[in-house]
Amino acid sequence: MTTETNNSAVEFTPDRLEKANEIIARYPEGKQKSALLPLLHLLQEQEGWTSPEGMDYVARMLDIQPIEVYEVATFYTMYHINPVGKHVIEYCRTGPCCLMGGEEVYSHLKQRLGIETGQTTVDGQFTLKEVECLAACGMGPVFQVREKYYMHLTNERVDEIIDELSK
Amino acid sequence: MAIKILTEHINVPGIESFDVYRKQGGYTAVEKAIKTMTPDAIVEEVKKAGVRGRGGAGFPMGMKWSFLAKPEGVPRYLVCNADESEPGTFKDHYLMKNIPHLLIEGMIISSFALGANKSFIYVRGELMYVIHILEKAIAEAKAKGFLGKNILGSGYDLELVVQPGGGAYICGEETALLESLEGKRGNPRNKPPFPAVKGLYQSPTVVNNVESIATTAWIVNNGGDAYAAVGIGRSTGTKLISASGHINKPGVYEIELGVPVEDFIYADEWCGGIRTGHKFKALVAGGSSVPILPANLALTLANGEKRLMSYESLSDGGFATGTMLGSGGFIVFDETSCIVRNTWNFSRFYHHESCGQCSPCREGTGWMEKVLHRIEYGHGHQQDIDLLVDVSKKIEGNTICPLGDAAAWPVASAIRHFRDEFQWHIDHPSEATQPGAVYKGEMALV
């Protein structure tokens, strides 16, 4: 997807701005760059992804160079550096989940959504991502949508969850 | 009844709230520590307890504390490593989610012992809901005077900050974690200097795992000697084991160190046996990094004695016949599991998570993944097994941080113990790539 050039500047909503200032104040004098990861989470929560405009906004807020934000956003897997669908399904592909049938359930999920890993459904509802271990191995297979963990997945359970989220 | 140091009250309804936790004896250790003990006395008790780092490395916690430099006028930091990401490990997740105040209490005691006035809990970003739970617990503790300025009228101040990660396994390495906490990419630092001298913001810093810090409440209440009396030999105390895979009862169990591996797998109290109708094939005892063992070696030492859940017994025999306790990520494989596929899966993990700083790891992890992929998908070459061994040896020990070793060991050990299975994939590609096909040759199933 191309970046819209006439995009109006990104700014935090008043309550998020308050939260951002509270986060920045947590660190010792002169160490405000420590707020970068939390602020990128806040940006993504608001915008759905870490857009270039949003990253520049965060850079200005922390008085650091934009490149310092880009290099961080691209290093960590949680930040979406491209636009995503309304629900991002982050599916665990690591060993312990696979032992519990994770690969079979994943095939079903891809079929159900009609997309492959990294793609977004045409209606913009779902983006599918594969992630590594989510620290819930005893409850696998597992995927995550925003903050919520969905565990003990089966084909039937996946259908129910997709139906629920589609409403 | 087995002793529970961390999880005795974990099933009490409402234990996540301050009031219920307090009613169960919570925060008495903070009172005892701050009102009646000196920081050095607490360090002494933790040393006596002999508790070893529960994140995976097993380094004695009291010793780590005693290395902390204390230059005048320079702040010191305690950072809790809650970046739990080692495949097979979900104990810190379980502990923080269910009994957050145990970690908060441990953080207060540990910070006081180390002379830190601002401490951090670095939680993997995926666990945002746990971060909210911890922040709520911190607010409650602060409202009750256990955090903030002048704790319990002692003049001691402490502020706790919960920091989210961004999704990177490497940030579980302590210097990568500190880089990340400073708002940078998680590239591990060259050592020395060690964090105890130059850590967070170039100040003296101790980094400890969640489970390690959580033990301090019990140690303060009961004494280091009492803690050391639990467990076996130099493996003192209890350990949280995250059990997953082909067992009847996956979950997190607190065990006294020294329980036989066989009992842990088969007793109803713990894993409840291999899932019904199946046989035990292999074990990864301490998270994906540690060497995989075939069933017979997992249960018994080379001399025929029972292998125990302890640092020493699990590593008995070195890598020839042993493994490591690691993080306690206990992954059980039954006879339906393909070792080649699992090894490829783990290799993909390490390739994905390599930070890219050191060439042996950056290039080697990708190379191993590629070779394992072609073996698994029926395109293996005869020389591939030796190639994998060679690449793994060239990664091991040649990187800034232990991720290189962690990537090399699963591959080297899978080949060491399951070489015939790899060879079968190479020799019989059409058979090996059938859906659900698994090597049925000679091996020690239990």
Image (cartoon, coloured by chain):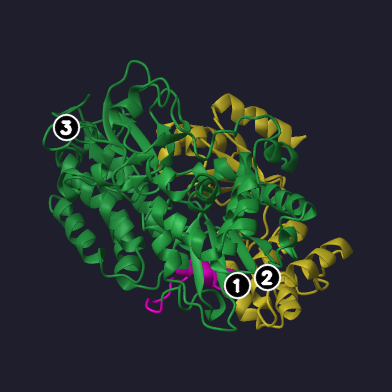
Look at 51% across and 37% down and name the residue there. A106
Do discs 2 and 1 belong to a common subunit?
A: no
Q: Amino acid at mark 1?
A: Gly
Do discs 3 and 1 belong to a common subunit?
A: yes
Asked if one can make out residue B329 in the rendered structure from this viewpoint, the answer is yes
Marks 2 and 1: CB-CB under 8 Å? yes
Q: Amino acid at mark 3?
A: Glu
Residue bearing the label numbered 3: B305
In the rendered view, does B177 fall on the left or right side of B127? left
The residue at the far top in this view is B277
Classify mark 1: residues with Cα within 10 Å, few (<14), some (14-19) or many (20+): many
Query: Which contiguous range is marked in magenta?
Result: B175-193
Picture colour for chain A = yellow
In the rendered view, does B52 fall on the left or right side of B72? left
Q: Amino acid at mark 2?
A: Ala
Q: Subunit of mark 3?
A: B
Residue bearing the label numbered 2: A35
